[in-house]
Amino acid sequence: MPDLRINWLSNSPNAATGYANQTRIFTPRIRDLGYPLCISAFYGVEGGSWDWNGIPLFPKGYDGYGNDIIPTHSARFFGGDPKAGLLLTLLDVWVLQPAALQMVNAAHWLPIDHDPVPPLVVKTLREGQGYPIAFSRFGLQKLREAGFPETLYVPHGAETQTFRPLDRPAVRARLGMDADWFIVGMVAANKGSAGHDRKSFGEAFDAFGQFLRSRQPTDPKCLLYVHSEVQGIYSGHNLPDLARGAGIPPDNIAYANQYEYLMGYPDEAMATLYNAFDVLLAPSQGEGFGIPILESQSCGTPVIVTDFSAMSELCGVGWKVGGQRRWTGQRSWQMVPDVAQVTEALELAYQSRHDRAAREHAAEWAQQYDADRVTREHWVPALEQLETWVKSRNRKAAYSPEFAAQAKALTEVKPPAPPPARSPFLDANPEPMEVGE
């Protein structure tokens, strides 16, 4: 029987994000393996804690990523000692503060979407003394090249019983989509940072516009469906403006219902959408994994991706395009897809749109990432290794005067005004949390 408590730090499982998706999929499965588990949500929970499917769900503190409250949530759930269990993070690790991570035993299920691993990621892992877990083979290789030979590999997963092939004509009829149109789908967050269009909306729209013009006027029945926020509120693009600039007529592009997108489409609705597509267009500049790429193929829909980072290994059925390296604000490289190659891939997808065997193969290929299979083949051995690691670290630390002083400080009420690197919550005496076996 496992003897390890876990504080899972990520997005709330009720949020409409990729991290929330994986939190929603795997935390109940890990709990059901026998590991007492809570979720510390830096996004999606405010103002108090609550229960989600029998799992305690804690909010962030004053820091946007929970750095100020990580040790105290851990101490509360672990029975008073923040190092008595494992902090398991699912986020971009460079947002975390090493000073907070040193107060816990932390493992990081993290994305690597650059080559090489960005310097700040390396710095956080080293100074925070965390155990890295890559969720792509690309990430595993790059982390080991960066000096982390102990890195584990646990891929993301999908609920393949939900994301499965459906009757396409019936799906399109239900969605009001014409059965004979060639439908290209994009499922991507319209966000940016310092002008960085990581999802390559510009290149994707440009390529679709060129493909459309090559088909007109003989075959204008082509539609780009974009499942995203359209105004560019989070430093992204105004997508209707971009479509006009790319020469895409209004009749050849459609967008997700913005209210429903904000509230979050349920998995069943997303599976229906994927089944309506002839191809998923996902030529990102870098992906730590790429959940829509997996979900699309699980539904039998091939994909177009950039041949870079995790996308290379996730293209089971579809087309990979090359491009030009781009230096980013993380002081490392990603890849901008070549528009001409994306346009060519769209033409190949058009020619293959009735290939039923390819769609069947895509769904079969995706089964290796079925959530139950990922749990059984990857999470079970990884958690066993992490439990051994935590116990080994704690045995060594038990002889350390520094550890003894730190543990005492966490459970004593002290005068206010802690140093900035410490949490304001650490001066409160955390009550141990009772969790049934």
Image (cartoon, rainbow, N blue to C red):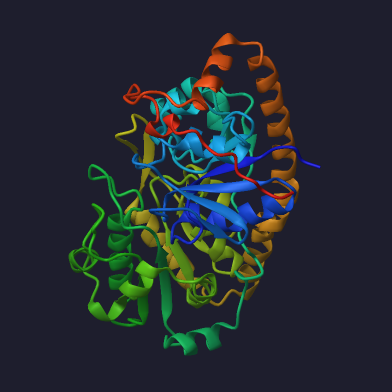
Viewer-closest of 185 and 398: 398
Q: Is residue 42 shown to the viewer in this render?
A: yes
On the rendered image, what quadrant is the N terminus found in? top right
Task: Please tell me whether residue 140 is drawn above or below residue 360 in the rendered image.
Answer: above
Task: Please tell me whether residue 402 is drawn above or below residue 417 in the rendered image.
Answer: above
Q: Quadrant of residue 151?
A: top right
| Residue 233 point in image, percent of width and height | 23, 58
- Looking at the image, residue 79 sits to the left or right of residue 46; the answer is right
Task: Please tell me whether residue 435 is drawn above or below residue 256 in the rendered image.
Answer: above
- Please give the name of the residue rendered at 57% of the width and 52% of the height, measured from the top-left corner: 56
- Please give the name of the residue rendered at 42% of the width and 63% of the height, measured from the top-left corner: 187
Q: Is residue 256 shown to the viewer in this render?
A: no
Task: Please tell me whether residue 291 is drawn above or below residue 107 in the rendered image.
Answer: below
Q: Quadrant of residue 316?
A: bottom right
- Looking at the image, residue 326 sits to the left or right of residue 4; the answer is left
Viewer-closest of 270 and 315: 270
| Residue 170 point in image, percent of width and height | 55, 88
- Please give the name of the residue rendered at 53% of the width and 23% of the height, measured from the top-left corner: 129
Q: Quadrant of residue 389?
A: top right
- Looking at the image, residue 119 sits to the left or right of residue 252; the answer is right
| Residue 294 point in image, percent of width and height | 56, 58
In the rendered image, the residue lying farthest to the right is 1
| Residue 371 point in image, percent of width and height | 66, 57
Viewer-closest of 103 and 174: 103
Q: How many marks?
A: 0
